Image (spheres, grey):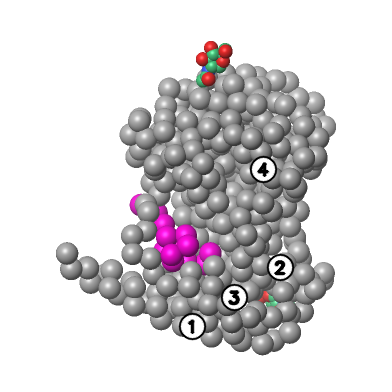
Amino acid sequence: MAPSRNGVQGRFLALLASLFLLAAVTTAAAIPAPAADQSPALDTRSLFNIALPILPCFKPTVRKEWSKLTSKEKKAYTAAVMCLANKPSIAKSIPAAVHRYDDFTGVHNMQTPDIHFVGHFLPWHRYYLWAYEKALKEECGYKGTQPYWDWTKDAETMPGKSMSQFDIFSGVDGFGGNGPWVETTPEQNWMGINDRTGGGCVTDGPFVNMTLNVGPGADYSTRNPHCLIRDFAPEKFKDNVGQDTINEVIQHKKYEDFAWRLEGLPGWSMKNFHGGGHFGVGGLLGSMGDSNNSPNDPVFYLHHANIDRIWTQWQEKNLIPRILDMGGPIKAFDYSNQRAGNVTLAFKIGLNELAPEIPIAAVMYTRGPMLCYKYE
Ligand SMILES: *[C@@H]1O[C@H](CO)[C@@H](O)[C@H](O)[C@H]1NC(C)=O
Ligand SMILES: *[C@@H]1O[C@H](CO)[C@@H](O)[C@H](O)[C@H]1NC(C)=O
């Protein structure tokens, strides 16, 4: 079968992009790095490894929206997640981890201060999702791809529908629903979430018996067996994950502006779909609202896949410059570079024992041979 015109064009563009990238990284490597925690130079092999990931792959896998999966596909996904939670931990850097699912939460926990409100928030989470999807496939025999949750579609059905009625929270073939109501004190409400509706352990769906051992909070050394908790906050959810917020984010032309606006600020001073998804599902007491340990809720990975999809859509609006466009602070909130510089394509991101350290350049283009996926 002859490749379609678009396919050929796409591959040509990607090839061109790889040459640009090689040039960009060579230049970056020639300039001494300002920050101590950035590798000063790259050898030829690293350059080759950087150029390689944006050469086009031929058959990207397709990540689909959760509600587009068949009931059988949905169950295969959640069963693979439970399979990870039944395999022993291998991450020595996370003493609290008991199983493979804990390994992932633990790595996110440990790196939380360094991977949020920084330039590499998006590439780090893209790499993290890729490693998770790989574990589901290679360690648990999962045959599908990482699904995403297009929350905007669900938010549009509110207030007619309640969050518990969303496909994704089905107790039959979804992630299970809200936890039962638990009272909180005003001091606990540091995030100003007054519309919370749950707070207890999830009572239906495939994760009712899941034991999570990492968290709460920043401690990743002490084993603390607990359940998956949800605390739906429907107003916070609806107000933050709409198309209006997406439009505001994607209008920015430079990556650093786009990425800054995407993450927004802690609190609700500006609409923010990243926070809307986390606190809309996790409220005050839920797993998704615990910033270090939010991957304890398996829905985390579908929420972040949608954020990754929005980055991909933004990149595809102007592919070549945008798969080479990286910036934003190395240190959290350091937008005025008081403590360090900005990240570049050569900046290294890592996942402890989950996957090797790589330069950001390796995950800029989802259709390269390493990542090799696209969104439907
Ligand atoms: C959870 O455990 C109970 C009690 O052992 C069992 O009846 C139930 O089927 C389990 N549910 C799931 C989804 O594993
Ligand atoms: C980091 O990026 C900001 C925003 O583009 C820019 O103003 C600043 O000069 C950059 N800092 C360094 C050290 O290059």
Q: Is residue 170 left or right of residue 212?
A: left
Badge 2: few (under 14), some or many (20 or more) residues near its Cα, within 10 Å?
Answer: many
Which percent across, then down, holds residue 39? Answer: 72, 74
Query: Disc 1 designates what residue?
Result: 20
Give, as a three-letter code, the residue at label 1: Phe
Query: Where does the image place residue 194, in percent across and percent down from the top left?
Result: 68, 32
Residue at (62% x, 19% y) in the render: 180
Q: Residues within 10 Å of mark 4 (few under 14, many from 20)?
A: some
What whole-number distance in Å separates the C-alpha atoms at marks 4 and 1? Answer: 38 Å
Q: Which mark is nearer the camera, 1 or 2? A: 1
Q: Which residues are magenta?
A: 363-376
First in residue order: circle 4 vs circle 2: 4
Q: Is mark 4 within 8 Å of ligand 1?
A: no
Q: CA distance from mark 1 to mark 2?
A: 23 Å
- The reply, left or right, for residue 207 in relation to residue 285 is left
In space, the residues marked 4 and 2 are separated at their CA atoms by 31 Å
- Nearer the viewer's eye, disc 3 or disc 2? 3
Q: Secondary structure at mark 1?
A: helix
* Separation of residues labelled 3 and 2 (CA atoms): 23 Å
Q: Toward the viewer: 59 or 295?
A: 59
**Residue tagged by mark 2?**
329
Q: Which residue appears at 51% of the width and 41% of the height?
A: 139
Q: What is the spatial separation of the Cα atoms under label 3 and label 4, in whole angstroms? A: 27 Å
Q: Dot 4 corresponds to which residue?
A: 90
